[in-house]
Image: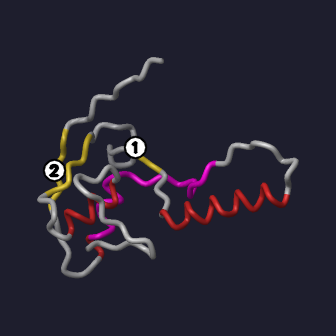
Amino acid sequence: MLAAGLIGEHPIGIPNNLMPYIQQVATGIRPELNVYGSDYNTRDGTAVRDYIHVMDLAEGHVAAVQKLIDNPKLGCIPINLGTGTGSTVLEMVKVPHAVPNTSYSTCQASTRVQLKLIC
């Protein structure tokens, strides 16, 4: 079973997030990782996201609740949890390669079609 941090992570079926998918490819559960799109206006052409660890996200939620408890008149304020520095998909893909005896393949796939939800 794959584990990340204290709460563990082992999605049933195909993961919806990049890191669990990378973990499954690195451990041989999946044959390869498809990288969708290489023509974005970024450092390496792949999409950029501000990745945050689930434990950091949980601690951020606890801090936000504590802030509201300490300042009940504060009301609703938007708070963005993140590092403030985005990483490309290929930068994230390279992370497990730093682990000794770990290698896996990636496949460059075409850019996904983006759907617009009209309400």
The image quadrant that residue 69 belongs to is bottom right
Residue type (three-letter) at the residue carrying disc 2: Cys
Quadrant placement of the N terminus: bottom left
Q: Residue at x 74, y 43 (%)?
A: 77
Number of numbered discs: 2
Q: Which residue is mark 1?
A: 42
The one of 70 and 85 positioned closer to us in this rendering? 70
**What's the distance in space between the residues labelled 2 and 1, CA to CA?**
19 Å
The one of 61 and 18 positioned closer to us in this rendering? 61
Find the residue positioned furthest to the top: 119
Per the image, label 2 sits on a secondary structure element best described as strand
- Estimate how packed mark 1 is, as few (under 14), some (14 to 19) or many (20 or more) residues with alpha carbons within 10 Å: few
Q: Is residue 37 left or right of residue 106?
A: right
Asked if the residue at tag 1 contacts the one at tag 2, i.e. Cβ–Cβ closer than 8 Å, the answer is: no
- 88 is within the stretch colored magenta: yes
- Estimate how packed mark 2 is, as few (under 14), some (14 to 19) or many (20 or more) residues with alpha carbons within 10 Å: few
Per the image, label 1 sits on a secondary structure element best described as loop
Residue type (three-letter) at the residue carrying disc 1: Thr
Of mark 2 and mark 1, the one earlier in the sequence is 1
Q: Is residue 112 above or below residue 28?
A: above
Find the residue positioned furthest to the bottom: 100
Q: Which residue is mark 2?
A: 107
Find the residue positioned furthest to the left: 31
Stretch in magenta: 80-96
- 45 is within the stretch colored magenta: no
Q: Residue at x 38, y 51 (%)?
A: 88
Q: Residue at x 60, y 54 (%)?
A: 81
Judged by depth in the image, the label closer to the viewer, 2 or 1, is: 2
